[in-house]
Amino acid sequence: MNVGLTIDKKELAEIARNLESLNMSDSKNKTILRQAMRKAAKPILSELKSLVPKDSVQLRKSLSIINGKNRRGVAPSVFVGPRVKGAFANENKTGFYFYFLEYGFRGIPGLRMLDQAARSKGSQALNDVTNQLKALIEKRFKK
């Protein structure tokens, strides 16, 4: 299931022009975009944490906003989901079993928590991205 949302193209074009007018390097522009996306994804994260079953405290703690990989020519990205690497690689801290709860296992149907969170808070997050970008650009202009 895909959750579709739309962005006002005029507003997005204005934001892109403002980013270009800051005369910063490409990596700094990507950093600003990533910061805005991380801030905008917080409502989805809180909704997802509220949908996790109460007895899965470890999973709830492992849920976070994760940066996508940095590659040349690829727009920055962020994901909402369980952390399973780094400090969360330990079996006592990891949220590796999120997949089983999300999609089901052994005849138990999946909870589809990500879909529910995206449907309920996705449009709010999308609107917040543009607002966060505007705020970050204004902050950079003041410097």
Image (cartoon, rainbow, N blue to C red):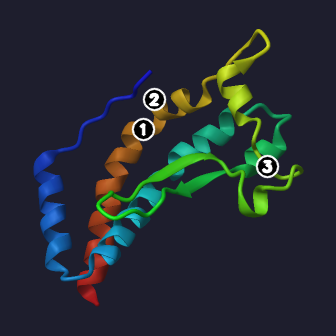
Q: Which residue is most to the front?
A: 72
Residue 28 image position (x, y, % from top left): 34, 77
Relative side of 67 to 27, left or right = right
x and y percentages locating residue 59 in the rendered image:
77, 43
Mark 3, Cα crowd under 10 Å, few <14 / some 14-19 / many 20+, is many
Residue 102 is situated, as x and y percent measured from the top left of the image, at 66, 27
Residue that badge 3 annotates: 94
Q: Nearer the viewer, residue 12 or 20?
A: 20
In the picture of the structure, the residue carrying the numbered disc 2 is 119
Q: Say which label, 3 or 1, has the lower sequence index.
A: 3
The circle on residue 44 is: none
Front residue (pair 2, 15): 2
Viewed as shown, does residue 40 lie left or right of 106? left
Residue appearing at x 39%, y 62% in the figure: 71
Residue depicted at 51% across the width and 49% down the height: 79
- Secondary element at image label 2: helix
In the rendered image, which residue does mark 1 sit on? 122
- The amino acid type, in three-letter code, at marker 2 is Arg
Dots 1, 2 in contact, CB < 8 A: yes
User: Of all residues shown, which one is farthest toward the bottom?
Assistant: 143
**Residue sitting at the far top:** 107
**73 up-or-down from 21: above or below:** above
* Closer to the eye: label 3 or 1: 3
Give how far apart the Cα atoms at labels 3 and 2 are. 26 Å
